[in-house]
Image: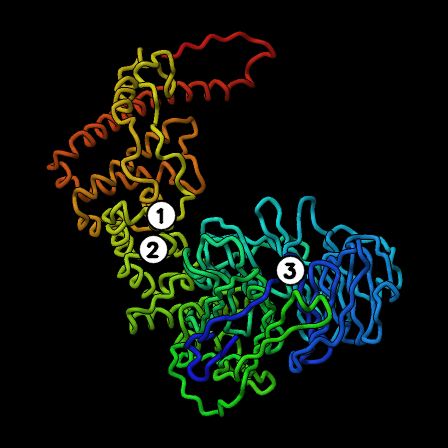
Amino acid sequence: MRNLYTQGNPCRCLIDTDVEALCRLTPDGLLGVEQSDKTDQFLVTDSGRTVILYKVSDQKPLGSWSVKQGQIITCPAVCNFQTGEYVVVHDSKVLRIWNNEDVNLDKVFKATLSAEVYRIHSIQGTEPLVLFKEGAVRGLEALLAEPQQKIETVISDEEVIKWTKVFMVFRHPVLIFITEKCGNYFAYVQMFNSNILSKYTLLLGQEEKSIIQSFTASVDRKFISLMSLTSDGCIYETLIPIRPNDPEKNQRVVRSLLLKAVVSGNARNGVTLTVLDQDHVAVLGPPLPASKECLAIWNTKFQTLQASKELPQGTSGQLWYYGENLFMLHGKFLTVIPYKCEVSSLAGALGKLKHSQDLGTHAMPHFVNWETSQGCGLEFQDSEPSKRILRRRKIEVSVEPEYPASKQLLSTVKKDSEKHIEVEVRKFLAVKRTPDFQIVTGDIVTGLVGRCRAEPSFYPRSALMQLIQTHVLSYSLCPALMEVALEKTDVQMLQLCLQQFPDVPESVICTCLKIFLSIGDDSLQETDINMESVSNYSDTVQDEKMEEQTEIVQNGFSPEEDNCGQEKSQAAAEEATSCPVIPKRAALLNAILHSAYSETFLLPHLKDIPAQHITLFLQYLYFLYLKCSENATMTLPGIHPPTLNQIMDWICLLLDANFTVVVMIPEAKRLLLSLYKFVKSQICICSELNKIEVSFRELQKLNQEKNNRELYSIEVLELF
């Protein structure tokens, strides 16, 4: 292997030369790489019988231990940072503890447990934690005190643990593990200072459901940032609160797109990722369908590729990161890459950062012949001194001035990228609401909209959608929001504003209506629209014509006996066709029907809508009426559908405002005739109901005189 790094700009290639003379890797591969109690020492566990303590700086192994023939190590060995001893599990239940002086694992401390172990976690500042396959967690000391203690079952049947990690938060360990069941994913967060276990359902959001191939995570004071690399080649982020509002409930969290197409969507093997720091992530996998595996470092804050290198010998899809060392399998070698990350800045992300610090630091990548390492020792191949480093981001938490989260977010809105703003908005909305939440939310939206006006290319749509759904905004609080959405023809946001804002002016309602009626079907098909108010609109109203159902009684009258009922039946049969608009347009029009308005202020604006659009809207409203007529309750199917009163009111409004124009359009003739027959039939029905009303009044009078009757009587009432 020649030079691994070159000095200089962090956006240049990570590895500038090709890989040479690599030896074969054993088929079993590795179980894991774990940090030892010394900074540059690591425990490497293979998938068979061997654990090796490896010192990076000296490029040599310090010790090697193996279990007996017939036994198999089932989880990576770890170091107990409190005692300096090493811990490993073989055959799922047998725990072994030893130190550097021990030679034979068969003669060291042994404890047989009552349940199968999934993973042992060890981290500075706490004792090792043992995670069992059924989801229970025990501290090592408590487990050693009673190895055969009963281990409870935490996860449900058929749930399988897929990934796990432990963090230190405020000097207390927090463990997270991800499970999968029937294609659904769940996150469990165990807090050991309060002994609280919280469960979260990971929702995939609006994206097409895809298979999750790899997980990684980082933590700050309030959230665990869970990242997942999926089969579509994208990285998604899910923010999981460390302190849940209701630990007893199975809460739901939604993932959001963090980076798009970082690897080929066709890749199935050799794909993984790991977090490097707050703003950087390392990804293994082919960037294009026909390309070979590649190691890439991405800046998640600015969504830029910082460095990449093709791996011609391939990789197993395993990647580990500890401190300033990145471990991966490249061909037949375990590769160790010491490095530091650049401070995340826009200049650095674009490759224009001027370095004021000395760049003389050398990174020495080392390559381990894994096949040889299981024998007498490790074989090394040295590279030339590095000519390039990535500086690690230095965060001095103790000296940072503390600002309220709302003020920090308002500052972020003015200068940061859309993706970073989206993440910060999610964090802001996830914490407990304060008394000034409505005012702060309005200020944030105002700031975002103001920046949209100043920077035409800036449009943080996802962040705005999240803020609208807080149910605290109104049109009067942020009037420019809908103006920007109208300029962008963002029908999804307009629909959401109409649903959430109680005070949208009539002029804006009509402008939205114009856009909803004029936008093309192709554009709507590509737009994500809330379809709750629409149900089965693509079906026909009725398969059989209503005039053929001569024996069915309608509104209390038989069509054979009443001419008005027959006319209504025929009119319905003529228009019993499919919906005149596609379902997504129907959902948008339903949002208009639900909007509050004043007839006096709305009518003048309705006159400005083109006649052909008015005709289309009338056709849709008449179709809705026919759908209502299908059942006795006179209601539409679906969640929050338009009511019959809303439908009738809008028909009247449109005709009042545009009748003289619509009547001149040939295409509207049949519709107007149908509406005429419909109104005529309603008049006939009302007339008959008035007749019945007279008879019922007489009955009511007779009922009032019942006190004058004897205990028993026979009465004959004649209704005319």
Q: Amino acid at mark 1?
A: Ala
Query: Along the line of sight, which residue is nearer the eye, 666 or 285?
Result: 285
Please give the residue where the numbered disc 3 appears in the rendered image. 26
Between disc 1 and disc 3, whose residue precedes? 3
**Nearest the camera: 392 or 700?**
392
Task: Please give the label number shown on residue 235.
Answer: none
- Residue at the image position 49 percent from the left and 67 percent from the top: 295
Horizontal and vertical percent position of residue 33: 66, 68
Residue plotted at (45% across, 73% down):
307
How many neighbours does mark 3 have within 10 angstroms: few (below 14), some (14-19), or many (20 or more)?
some
User: How far is the residue under mark 2 from the one under mark 3?
Assistant: 59 Å
CA separation, marks 1 and 3? 62 Å
Is label 2 in contact with label 1 (beta carbons under 8 Å)? yes
**Disc 1, SS:** helix
* Residue 422 lies in quadrant: bottom left
Q: Is residue 190 visible?
A: yes
The numbered mark at residue 494 is 2
Q: Which residue is mark 1?
A: 591
Residue that extends furthest to the left in the rendered view of this protein: 664
User: Depth-wise, is mark 2 or mark 1 nearer the camera?
Assistant: 2
Q: What's the residue type where badge 2 is placed?
A: Leu
188, above or below 519, in the image: below
